[in-house]
Image: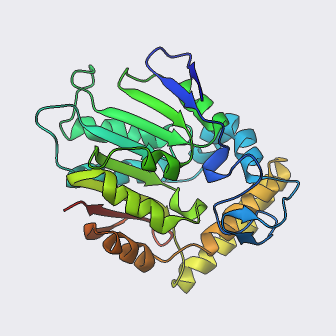
């Protein structure tokens, strides 16, 4: 394992040599299907495609912030999820709050999480008693973009996959965890949620945000229409990574329903799952579920 400091003195990135969004450098994926449709067995591609999700996320990293800025409501949805998370998490009284942002990407969700924690009373804009925030992502390119932003000393970034990072944490060591657009890209979903339940302190909370259209025919039709009429054609016109956008379409189409995610949280021992509904034209597709550790 090697470590490199970012251009911001208050932000460090620890590297472990794992490629983007839960995809290992040998071409294995954790999303259940390869971008070219190859089958996946035990998290590894039966056929390693020339195009790899790992490489695609690294290539997309420099333009990622500009790309998501074109998605109406993207940042507001992250803010709402982070606020919902903090509204449910118990604030520690004798130490800084410890929170994690799994699948942090270029840091947009990390910023939302930090702001929400401060607004909830964990730290201040001046940095006094700031929450200790760890952003976790397996994409070196995405983390490089995150590290270019300005962060307080209490924020750090780790390059590894979410499950490995969670398994390395002590039990009852985190007060809150945000995972936005993570669960859809991994196969070991039960294991990740079980680990979330293990690492949360009693009264700690988790928020899972993602696209989900399963069991909702109108939402599925809307998602297909947007992808095939807008997102993928724009990728072709802009000479962007078309296979990445096709993967995005399929991964959302095939992802769990809100009800399945709800049941997964309760099976892991987390209490009182609540469904946060977002506004705007994506309200039938973007969902956040929160739950607390008893």
Q: Can residue 282 be spotted in the picture?
A: no
Q: Residue at x 41, y 79 (%)?
A: 259
Q: Is residue 261 left or right of residue 214?
A: left
- x, y percent for residue 158: 51, 35
Number of dots carrying numbers: 0
Image quarter (top left, top right, bottom left or bottom right) of the N terminus: top right
- Res 88 → quadrant: bottom left
Is residue 55 found left or right of 30 in the rendered image?
right
Q: Position of residue 54 (x, y in %)?
A: 72, 48
Q: Left or right of 230: which side holds 243?
A: right
Residue 237 showing in the rendered view = yes
* Residue farthest right in this picture: 50
User: How far across and how far down the image is residue 196, in percent?
Assistant: 37, 56
The location of residue 211, given as percent across then percent down, is: 52, 65
Residue at 29% across, 53% down: 85
- Colouring method of the image: rainbow
Observer-nearest residue: 262 or 224?
A: 262
Query: Which quadrant would the C terminus be assigned to in this image?
Result: bottom left
- Given residues 236 and 13, the one toward you in this image is 13
Vertical order, 73 against 138 (above or below): below
Which quadrant of the figure has residue 116? top left
Up-down: is 170 above or below 292?
above
């Amino acid at each position: 394992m090697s470590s490199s400091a970012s251009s911001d003195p208050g932000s460090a990135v620890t590297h472990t040599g794992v490629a983007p969004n839960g995809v290992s450098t040998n071409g294995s994926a954790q999303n259940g299907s390869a971008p070219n449709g190859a089958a996946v067995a035990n998290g590894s591609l039966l056929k390693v495609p020339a195009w790899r999700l790992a490489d695609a996320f690294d290539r997309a990293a420099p333009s990622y912030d500009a790309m998501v800025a074109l998605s109406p409501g993207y940042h507001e949805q992250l803010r709402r999820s982070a606020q919902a998370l903090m509204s449910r998490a118990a604030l520690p009284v004798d130490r800084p709050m410890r929170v994690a942002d799994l699948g942090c990407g270029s840091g947009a969700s990390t910023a939302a999480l930090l702001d929400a924690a401060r607004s909830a009373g964990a730290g201040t804009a001046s940095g006094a008693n700031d929450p200790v925030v760890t952003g976790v992502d397996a994409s070196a390119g995405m983390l490089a973009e995150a590290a270019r932003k300005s962060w307080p000393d209490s924020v750090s970034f780790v390059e590894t996959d979410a499950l490995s990072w969670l398994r390395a944490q002590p039990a009852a060591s985190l007060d809150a965890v945000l995972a936005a657009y993570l669960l859809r890209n991994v196969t070991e979903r039960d294991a990740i949620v079980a680990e979330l339940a293990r690492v949360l302190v009693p009264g700690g909370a988790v928020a899972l945000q993602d696209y989900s259209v399963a069991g909702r025919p109108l939402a599925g039709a809307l998602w297909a229409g947007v992808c095939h009429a807008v997102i993928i054609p724009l990728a072709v016109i802009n000479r962007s990574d078309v296979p990445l956008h096709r993967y995005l379409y399929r991964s959302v189409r095939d992802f769990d329903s809100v009800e399945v995610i709800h049941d997964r949280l309760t099976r892991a021992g987390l209490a009182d799952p609540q469904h946060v509904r977002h506004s705007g034209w994506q309200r039938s597709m973007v969902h956040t579920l929160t739950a607390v550790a008893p």
